[in-house]
Image: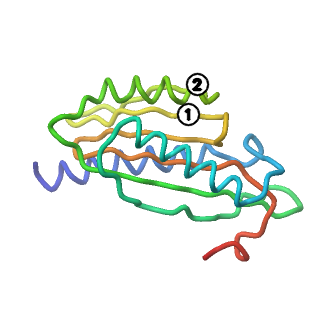
Amino acid sequence: MTGADLIRGLRGTLVVVLAVVALSGCSAGQTDARPSVVKKEIVHSVTLATSDIGGDWRVYRGPDVESCSDHDEDHVRYVYIVERPKSADDDVAADMRKLEGSWEHAGIAVERFSTKGENPTVGLRGFGGPVTSIGYVSYYGGYRITGVSKCAPGDALELSD
């Protein structure tokens, strides 16, 4: 694998992660729950997804609080991203089927996607249910799961660690 292959793969993954976060606006996923509740929900949803697939996952980001206020009052959401390298035993198609079933059971609407090119990125985008959005990405070097919680009343500066 060349450095150019690595950059192409990471670029594709970054585009997917940014798309999931960008599409997760607050108005569609707003709740009156406390910030601690939506934080637990997104961590739980991502953790269930990693359990469905298996393997040793590491935290890439979060759960980080950020503002999602598009109203007069403050609102926050949590972003949680985990990743792991691929192994020879991985079956991407089977993993996607497991996640689709699990997410649909949780009330999350799921759609598949893939990029083009020599080393395509494939994955799932999920919206609704206990999350604003959740995404699964399989690229040549690994897996990544990105979760964005619903928005809850709160101040991101006060809640940041």
- Left or right: residue 73 versus residue 68 is right
Horizontal and vertical percent for residue 7? 25, 54
Tally of numbered discs: 2
Circle number at residue 86: none
Q: Residue at x 54, y 27 (%)?
A: 110
Specify few, some or many for label 2: CA neighbours under 10 Å numbering under 14, 14-19, or 20 or more.
few
Horizontal and vertical percent for residue 30? 77, 46
Horizontal and vertical percent for residue 74? 81, 64
- Left or right: residue 95 versus residue 159 is left
**Callout 1, which amino acid?**
Gly
Residue at image mark 1: 126
Vertically, is 47 above or below 77?
A: above
**Callout 2, which amino acid?**
His
Horizontal and vertical percent for residue 50? 41, 43
Circle number at residue 105: 2
Looking at this view, name the residue that lies furthest to the left. 1
Cα distance between the residues tagged 2 and 1 = 12 Å
Looking at this view, name the residue that lies furthest to the right. 72
Q: Residue at x 73, y 49 (%)?
A: 26
Numbered disc 2: secondary structure: helix
Specify few, some or many for label 1: CA neighbours under 10 Å numbering under 14, 14-19, or 20 or more.
many
Q: Which residue is more in the foreground, 14 or 42?
A: 42
Q: Looking at the image, is mark 2 or mark 1 nearer the viewer?
A: 2
Numbered disc 1: secondary structure: strand
Q: Answer with the quarter of the image where residue 53 lies.
A: top left
- Left or right: residue 128 versus residue 7 is right
Q: Of marks 2 and 1, which one's residue comes earlier in the chain?
A: 2
Q: Residue at x 49, y 23 (%)?
A: 101
